[in-house]
Image (tube, rainbow, N blue to C red):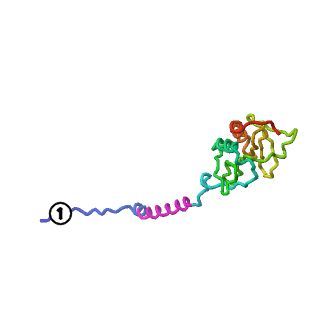
Amino acid sequence: MAPTRGPEVVRRLPRVLVGIALALPVLIVVGVLVASAVLVREPVPDADTVRLPVAAVPVPAAASADCSRLLSGLPGEIPTERGLLPRRVLDDPVPAATLAWGGEDGRAPIVLRCGLPRPVELAPGASTLDAAGVDWVAVEDGVPGSTTWVTVDRAVYVGLTIPDDVGTGPVQDVSRGVKIALVSRPAG
């Protein structure tokens, strides 16, 4: 005699689980497509890799030992009201004896030039700014939204163009480097 079997149990998955099992691969594919569309955008330019264009100006004493000494001793970052601005690699042709910091996001950079000619604004009775023991005079250079300061009491003239929204930190920081690297002379 054959063994008797009990009633067969029919196992069925609930319809909800079947729906989830079928929809899950579709949702994963859609998620991957959306994530790749969001992540694969135009890369944001990096200040370390994008060269900064800076206009050349006459710097007759650019090749001097004074300028070489100053440029090699200046910091890699400058403190400002916007935070620390990194030194930038300049675009070719690189202007002689020129450094720049910042300039990201379309903002104007801080630009230092060493070996400038004597500024016409340096006249008897000219108003100067003393920053960390270095005398500076403001010069008119036609750069809107910026102020250019030129040292008046050092072996070579150094210009520092600063956007108006960064504060006075760059003048103080550069003045320390100027004071160490350049011999003082009477203003004028």
* Residue 162 is at least partly visible in this image: no
Q: Is residue 17 magenta?
A: no
**Residue 28 as seen in the image, left or right of residue 54:** left
**Residue 143 as seen in the image, left or right of residue 83:** right
Residue ID at (80%, 42%): 137
126 shown above or below 1 = above
Q: Give x and y (percent) for residue 71.
A: 67, 44
**Residue 5 as seen in the image, left or right of residue 127:** left
Residue ID at (80%, 50%): 141
Task: Specify the segment rendered in magenta.
Answer: 21-40
Q: Give x and y (percent) for residue 12.
A: 34, 63
Question: Which quadrant is the C terminus positioned in?
Answer: top right
Q: Secondary structure at mark 1?
A: loop
The three-letter code of the residue at mark 1 reads Thr
Q: Which residue is mark 1?
A: 4
Q: Give x and y (percent) for residue 105.
A: 67, 53
Majority secondary structure in the magenta region: helix
**Residue 129 as seen in the image, left or right of residue 93:** right
Q: Give x and y (percent) for residue 7.
A: 24, 63
Question: Which quadrant is the N terminus positioned in?
Answer: bottom left
Q: Nearer the viewer, residue 21 or 31?
A: 31
154 shown above or below 29 = above
Rendering quarter of residue 152: top right
